[in-house]
Image (tube, coloured by chain):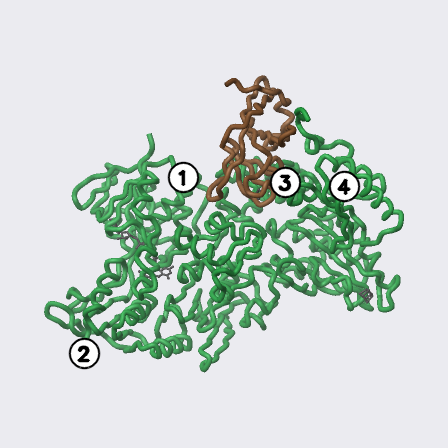
Amino acid sequence: MDPEWLEVGHLEDIPRLGARVVRTPQEDIAVFRTAGDEVFALRDKCPHKGGPLSQGIVHDRSVTCPLHNWCIHLDSGKARAPDEGSTVRYDVRVENRTVYLSLSPVAP
Amino acid sequence: MRQKLVLIGNGMAGMRTVEELLKQDSDLYEITVFGDEPHGNYNRILLSPLLSGEKSLDDIMLNRTEWYAQNGITLNTGKRIESIDRKRRVVIASDGAETPYDRLILATGSRPFVIPIPGKDLPGVISFRDIHDVEAMLESSRTGKHAVVIGGGLLGLEAANGLMKQGMDVTVVHLLDTLMERQLDKPAATLLKASLEARGLRFLMQARTEAFVGEDRVTAVRFEDGHEVPADLVVMAVGIRPNTELATRAGLYCERGVVVDDTLQTYDPRIYAVGECVQHRGETYGLVAPLFEQARVCANHLAQYGIARYEGSVTSTKLKVTGIDLFSAGDFSGGDGAEEIVMQDAAGGVYKKLVLRDNRIEGAVLYGDTVEGAWYFQLMREETDISDFRDRILFGRHHLGDSGHGGQNQAVLMANDAQVCDCNGVCKGDIVNAITQKGLFTLDDVKTHTKASASCGSCTGLVEQILASTLGGDYESPEHKPMCKCIDLTHDQVRAAIRDQHLKSVRSAMDFMEWKTPDGCAACRPALNYYLISTWPEEAADEYQSRFINERAHANIQKDGTYSVVPRIFGGETSPAQLRALAEVAEKYDVPTVKITGGQRIDMLGLRKEQLPGIWGDLAAAGFVSGHAYGKAMRTVKTCVGSQWCRFGVQDSTRMGIELEKLTWGSWTPHKFKLAVSGCPRNCAEATIKDFGVVAIDSGWELHVGGNGGVKVRATDLLCRVETETEVLEYCGAFMQVYREEARYLERTAPWVERVGLSYVKQRVVEDEIGRKALFRRFLDSQEIYQFDPWEQRARGVDEHEFTVMRQVGG
Ligand SMILES: Cc1cc2nc3c(=O)[nH]c(=O)nc-3n(C[C@H](O)[C@H](O)[C@H](O)COP(=O)(O)OP(=O)(O)OC[C@H]3O[C@@H](n4cnc5c(N)ncnc54)[C@H](O)[C@@H]3O)c2cc1C
Ligand code: SF4
Ligand code: FES
């Protein structure tokens, strides 16, 4: 099935090693940008106690939740061991520095 | 193709190196391990409890054979390496099989020393080194009755205790007149001997063994004076020698041990050596803590980071005989210029001795009450000047105030369901289980596996104690605690590099120090950023993405992801107009909760992030600036009404507080920083639990430092008295500046003052007038740059992206 790609903004709108939020009626989606300009999107809810992952510190391909320091892998949405749990992931595509997001969640 | 790494010696140091290496880079090498014992890797330290029956074989395994397979390591057990051909770069096993290597680690441990006397090869005469020896001892204890242990050192006593627990009748033979002479002085050794005798051990002191008697098996031990003691088993525990045989045969340079440099390389740079077989800077080590440090450095080098160096270790010892508390560290022999502090209660079975030189601990012997051992050891390694609490030091740190890592003595007594880490709700039992089941050794391991001490850190001391008591007394906190997993350097080393190398950005600091991770982590990035801006306030750029969300958004994130806002109320003094403005703003933004804080301010809780710039704009318009309640920064100045109103006030504490707050607001510090000013010694503003406290007296002001009303309450130390307000401001700025420049990130003033000593702080801030003025100058210079209102800027649109969503879809 061809996912529906939604244009959400420019790569430059997201700070390097930072994140921005795309708000949908269902939920907030955090869109992350790594130091190497890779872009990932996760449900903006930590699998631990629902902390806003978009507000965490981004390093390499992961983000540390601002509430209790769980570390979540951006590419899988999974918590780094030994913590267990995962959050929903969304597909992202960057073309000509424009960021497209698919709103169909990818099961963890 | 991957390089080939071969490890000879499947023991504690070698396998620790491999584990560390896997953590740093698991793909670099194809690893092959040789061990001549028939087991996986086990915890040799726990052989004593294995012998005494307190632990089972299963309890002491560190890595089972499956683990090796899972990690792609080829394990050869029961296979001895006979020689190394360095030209062809192969190792040759006893069955002739050859295995090539690109890099080789020697970790062959040591050999028990065997006294060369007749009968030494008789069956029944053994040493105490590996599982095989323990099995032999257990076997003998089932059939025989009498055991003789030669050697009254650590190992000998542990063996004797174990055999006694197995029901044997044990005699310990010692050449000298004191037991454990390398660790204990006479009084402590005497106490030890008495309590071991009370448990049923027999001692023959100053006895020279002449021969072991027997035909097919040992039956007795004969002494020089001709008398004999019956023995079905003889355990020789008279010392160990580094096992250098293989290395010598391969032509590697050896003295007492295989000689290595600070990267653990031998004279052949392809060959590393770690553990007991090693001689480093003239020293050999027989305890695991230093070997683990070696392992870490060696792995770092093998992983081609090459930034860590091993510089030697200071060690301490504990005796693992249940019910006997004994601790010793360093050099306790005294001698010229050394002083001793001694506490002796022979009837109560307690003895404590500290040997000092220039008010620094050089050695310690504790018997009967060892709860402070870890603390003394830390003071010793950090070479802390103890003159400030010398008179109380023997009574322990809880008599000093307890802001640091308190709770040394609690661990053993604690019930398993007692909560240790209040932040993450971790109980003692969880920690103990994780340590035993997962084979954890370090605080870091415990942190990642249990979360204990992973948050505020106030339970760190307790967790270390639990680690120590669970591992059976073999744990020592590492000498140099690295900043985090991303780098092997300590906070102090990182800070020094930033200063010495003139590093100005997080990126250049990471590149220069060869960070192991691409962008660090949530622990080191904020620390690095702080070190940069505090060292080079005028030159380093404050790096936005390295700040925790609170500081990035200039408001406190709360549990539900909303924020709270605390405007500054200078000195806690307000006016109807200000209150009205606050009330109006709170109503306008529909603030769910308005609360007076403990620091005399007003907290507005429950704001959504996008509301922040708006409310800040309104607050700024009413004359408020940010209270920095979210930052590792100067927070509040609490005051009482002082001489303006109070019957007792001798000075105007409110005005003093306002002046101080005007001076210091907006400054970033290693951790939050609080002040208070009281108008008289009744101290209604509680200035003596603040980082910087001021108490008015008739003749001027008393300045206090290092107080903490938080997790661990600590009253301040008196810094000095001054007469004028100008002096108060200057001393305060100077104090904050030393703290800012020298404390570790997230170290509050209380533990910092304890670590560096009050005398040091006095010397910098009080005695050295020129230095104080220079510190104050630097404080003011930094304030030139950092004293601005972040709220006002953001209300004007700075960092707008932080407060707006990227895109709103539907809804
Ligand atoms: C009973 C006992 C109690 C102890 N208690 C404590 C304590 O409380 N605290 C503490 O800190 N330390 C203690 N120690 C010391 C600690 O166990 C050692 O310091 C540590 O194990 C040394 O590690 P290593 O890797 O250098 O050597 P080992 O752990 O001895 O490992 C060396 C391994 O290499 C193998 N080997 C040697 N040559 C070859 C070869 N040619 N081919 C193949 N394999 C080979 C050996 O058989 C051995 O398995 C204790 C030791 C003993 C024996
Ligand atoms: S500290 Fe002294 S001056 Fe201040 S309120 Fe209390 S009694 Fe009055
Ligand atoms: S909510 Fe993310 S770590 Fe707890």
Using the rendered image of the protein, determine whether residue B514 is visible from the camera's viewpoint.
no
- In the picture of the structure, the residue carrying the numbered disc 4 is B788
Report helix, strand or loop for mark 1. loop
Which chain is assigned brown? A
Q: CA distance from mark 3 to mark 4?
A: 17 Å
Q: Which mark is residue B351?
A: none
- In the picture of the structure, the residue carrying the numbered disc 1 is B303
The chain containing the residue under callout 3 comes to B
In the image, residue A66 sits, relative to residue B142, either above or below, namely above
The chain containing the residue under callout 1 comes to B
Task: Choose between B435 and B531: the one closer to the eye.
Answer: B435
Q: Which mark is residue B228?
A: 2
- In the picture of the structure, the residue carrying the numbered disc 3 is B547
Of labels 2 and 4, earlier in sequence is 2
Camera-side mark, 2 or 3 = 3
Q: Are marks 2 and 1 in contact (CB under 8 Å)?
A: no
Q: CA distance from mark 3 to mark 1?
A: 30 Å
Pointers 4 and 1 within a single chain: yes
Residue at the image point whose x is 62% and y is 51% from the top: B742
